[in-house]
Each structure stands twice: as C-alpha cells, then as structure tokens.
Image (cartoon, rainbow, N blue to C red):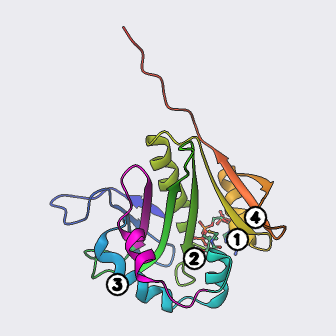
Amino acid sequence: MKARRPTRPDPRPERTEALRLADGRELWLRPVHPADAGPIAGAFELLDEDEVRRRYLHPVKALNPEYLDALVRPVPGEAFAVVAAEPLPPGEALVGALARLSRDPDRDSAEFAILVSHFVSGQGLGIALMRRLVEWAEANGIRRIWGDVLDENTAMIALAQVMGFRRDTSPESPNLLRIVLELSPPKKTRRR
Ligand SMILES: CC(C)(COP(=O)(O)OP(=O)(O)OC[C@H]1O[C@@H](n2cnc3c(N)ncnc32)[C@H](O)[C@@H]1OP(=O)(O)O)[C@@H](O)C(=O)NCCC(=O)NCCS
C-alpha cells in the first residue's frame, strides 16, 4: 500500500492521507467528521456477527444514536477517531474502517478500539489506522495505549505483535488479553 501526498488545489478534509490498497481501491485516511454518522451506521449493518463480536466483545445489533454521536464528535484532547473512507466528502463517503482512542481518567493512558470491515481487511489498513492513533496519543502526552481483545482474535493479536504491543492478562475476563503499547515520552525542548 502506498501513501501519496495530496496535490493542490485540494478538496480533502484536514489531515487526509490518500492510500492506494493492494486491490487498487483508493481510500482516504482522515479524522472522523460528524457527517460520517450516517455512513458509519450504514456500514455497521454490513458487518458480520463475528467481526462485531471481536470489536465489542459481545453481540451488538445496531449502534445507538448517543454512542454514534460521541463517536463522530470526539471531545478534543480526550478522544480521537480516524476513518478510512471513500475519496469523497464526509457524508457522501462510505466508511470502511474506523479506529478510536479514549483517554482514561488517569490521563496517562488511553483505550483503543478498531474495526476494519472484511471488505477492505488484510491490506494494511489496521496498521495504518493504529499508527494514526499512536501519533495522536504521542502528540497529546499519552504514555500508553491499550485494549482488551478476545484470546482467539488472531488477526488483532498478530497486528499488535507487529506494532510492538505486549500482552498482559485482562482484569475483565479470563477470555481476554490486554494488549498494551508503551509510547515514546514527549521530546524535551532544549532551553537556552
Ligand atoms: C484486527 C483487524 C483490525 C486487522 O485489520 P487489517 O486491516 O486486516 O490488518 P492489517 O492488514 O493492517 O494487518 C496487519 C498485520 O496483522 C496480521 N494479520 C492481520 N489479519 C490477520 C489474520 N486474519 N490472521 C493472521 N494475521 C493477521 C498480519 O501480521 C498483518 O501484517 P502483514 O500483512 O505484514 O502480514 C481487523 O481484522 C478487524 O477489524 N477485526 C474485527 C474487529 C476487531 O477484532 N477489533 C479488535 C478489538 S477492538
């Protein structure tokens, strides 16, 4: 998958990275936008039960409006979400993948969640989305990111291994692994 630098004039939303997948599809990786709510709700209906269960750790039939609203309007500094969507303006673009980070009350750590739909999985999007989460976390002074994943979730466990996450037991359930990535401390600026 190749990242391409946008050319000007550019109608793309801020912080858009254009990606060409191995299957030839072009997608834009960009922060979520409130207008994505409809396409995200629509895309959810196309997911299979197993990918929903791996993401939410239990069956979910539909996204409730409050949850969806919080997802597309992350509170600045507290949460962040990035989508991989069709190269069209938010609201018109189908959303194929989404990852989010929510800062914990201790403020040093943040929980991630990610879902790459089976229509576009296995082409590096998971890694690309997680890298955007790491970038945001580091810029916001977060020291570690973590998530609980089912111990049978080989795809997520493999992705986590590629990115250098460590595996811990989860305090939530024996069927879960807690994967944790320690981030680089903020760079010190030299004082003169
Ligand atoms: C887990 C998930 C995010 C992976 O997304 P993806 O876009 O397919 O992942 P990538 O293509 O970036 O793969 C990254 C690495 O993970 C590993 N990987 C991905 N899918 C895999 C699979 N099915 N089996 C084994 N390894 C896999 C590979 O090592 C891959 O690196 P490689 O391509 O260089 O070999 C996606 O399958 C998903 O959304 N699953 C359902 C929701 C979920 O499980 N969320 C996690 C809990 S919040």
Quarter of the image holding residue 28?
A: bottom left
Between the residue at mark 2 and the residue at mark 3, the CA separation in whole angstroms equals: 21 Å
> Which of pointers 4 and 3 indicates the residue nearer the eye?
4
Q: Secondary structure under badge 1? A: helix
Disc 4 residue type? Glu
Residue at position x 49%, y 63% from top?
100
Quickly name the residue at label 2. 121
The residue most toward the right is: 174
Q: Which mark, by number, is residue 38?
A: 3
Decide: is 27 above or below 139.
below
Q: How many marks?
A: 4
Give the x, y percent position of residue 82.
43, 64
Q: On the image, which quarter does residue 8 sit in? A: bottom left
Circle 3: is it few (<14), some (14-19), or many (20+) Cα within 10 Å? some
Check if residue 82 falls in the magenta segment: yes
Ligand 1 has an atom within 8 Å of the beta carbon of the residue at disc 1: yes
The residue type indicated by label 1 comes to Ala
Residue 55 on the magenta segment = no
Q: Are marks 2 and 3 in contact (CB under 8 Å)?
A: no
Q: Label 4, secondary structure: give it.
A: loop
Residue where numbered disc 4 is placed = 172
Instruction: Work out whether 109 lies above or below 53.
Output: above
Q: Along the polypeptide, which appears first: circle 1 or circle 4? A: 1
Residue at the disc numbered 1: 155
